[in-house]
Amino acid sequence: MPVTDVRAAARRTPRLHWAWFVAFAAFVALVGAAGFRAAPSVLIDPLHREFGWSRGTISAAVSINLLLYGFISPFAAALMERLGMRKVVASALLLVSAGSGLTVFMTASWQLLLCWGVLVGTGTGAMALAFVATVTSRWFVRHRGLVSGVLTAGGAAGQLVFLPLVAALATDHGWRPASLAVAGAALAVVPVVLLLLRDRPSDVGTTPYGGEAEQEPPRVRGGSVVRALTVLRDAARTRTFWLLAGGFAICGASTNGLIGTHFVPAAHDHGMPHTTAAGLLALVGLFDVAGTIASGWLTDRVDARWLLGAYYTLRGASLLVLPHLFAPTTEPPMWAFIVFYGLDWVATVPPTVALCRERFGMAGPIVFGWVFASHQVGAAIAAFSAGLTRDHLGSYDLAWYVAGGLCLLATVMSLRIRSNGRVAPKH
């Protein structure tokens, strides 16, 4: 058979598109990165007992982590344009592993800020949600929203896998074995990334899934820092950017910053054991997987602005009732909150990614990186201020009420984003 006929037959032979291997590697990397970000909420009290550090001090380390997790994201997206995703993600996982492992040698609070805040924040920031936007923009045309939802759910899956384990280890053996377990898990993901993650479809002789070769973004030369800042300058001139960034800042405050960091100690204040509270937070992650995938599916079909408005409204309402649900045991109203809030946890991500891509084109992943940076600013402020609120008022109630009100503001901001006159493709 002539060579041309062999190649034609090969093209007709059904096989799994390489984009799905890339998506799998990205999912596993996001799961690995999520482990240490799940740990703070169950380590606040053990660190407070051993070192005597205030919750405000420990929350400050969480805030640094959250800030870097956000602000590294746009620069990491630009660096991925220049060096490739595989190198950046593998290096980030090594940094996460080193940062979490070194915490076992801590003797002073500044070391907590360095390891838990700077090292892990930088490493996880390189695998933040701008990584999701980069993967979907390069590798997918068809099912972009759905894949965005699945990859975003990777963070929730990481919380689901690690949080009960971290809580059990911290309770039975101390916080050091818990930190080492997270370090080992992040390290174990590196071979998967090196084996399966590829930077562009052309690297393996294919095209984006559901698209043509010319839809692949051009390779960018030059400095990554300049590229990220130039994109920010251009995007900041638009109203859409500020509405997305403001809404996403509130999203971060009401999820990672508040619930993700302080739900466990807040539940413990009402007599609930740490392991039980950590299990509830893990269930939030479980339902988030379903909610985020469903949100991705809807993003392919429904106006993203209306989805954001609905998500923020429902989240705000649930936070306003949360202070009345805490008890020593898990009663039916708390179970209802966990299911409801879990479905909404990061359902905001797929429509936000879609809006960045629609409004800003090939620069969409970097723009989303900056929008995500605002998410982490909100998370950091909420994590720190909620810790201070608990220290000074003896209760987290005010933090829940403020977050609920802000979510209703985010609803208004989302609905004020102007339509671009296009309808999302149905896949």
Image (cartoon, rainbow, N blue to C red):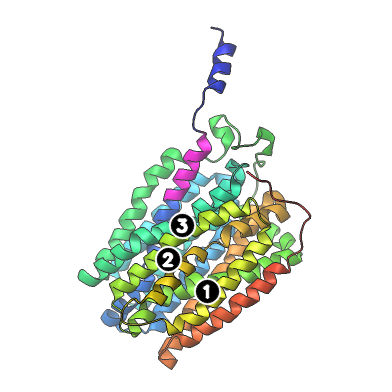
The span picked out in magenta is 17-28
Q: Amino acid at mark 1?
A: Ser
Location of mark 3 (residue): 289
Rendered location of residue 18, percent (x, y): 51, 35
Above-or-below relation of 207 to 165: above
Number of labelled discs? 3
Above-or-below relation of 184 to 113: above
From the viewer's perspective, is 361 left or right of 330? right
| Nearest-to-viewer mark from 2 and 1 | 2
Dominant secondary-structure state across the stretch colored magenta: helix
On the question of residue 126 being in view, the answer is: no
Quadrant of the rendered image containing residue 44: bottom left
Of residues 5 and 229, the one drawn nearer to the viewer in this rendering = 5
Rendered location of residue 391, percent (x, y): 41, 89
Location of mark 2 (residue): 284
Q: Which dot marks residue 51?
A: none
Residue shown at 25%/64% (left/top)?
177
Of residues 286 and 399, the one drawn nearer to the viewer in this rendering = 286
Looking at marks 2 and 1 on the same chain, the residue that comes earlier in the sequence is marked by 1
From the viewer's perspective, is 29 left or right of 358? left
Q: Amino acid at mark 2?
A: Val
Furthest-bottom residue in this view: 393
Location of mark 1 (residue): 254
Q: Amino acid at mark 3?
A: Val
Rendered location of residue 129, percent (x, y): 54, 57
| Nearest-to-viewer mark from 3 and 1 | 3
Q: Secondary structure at mark 1?
A: helix
Spatial separation of the CA atoms under disc 3 and disc 1? 18 Å
Q: Is residue 22 magenta?
A: yes
Specify few, some or many for label 1: CA neighbours under 10 Å numbering under 14, 14-19, or 20 or more. Answer: many
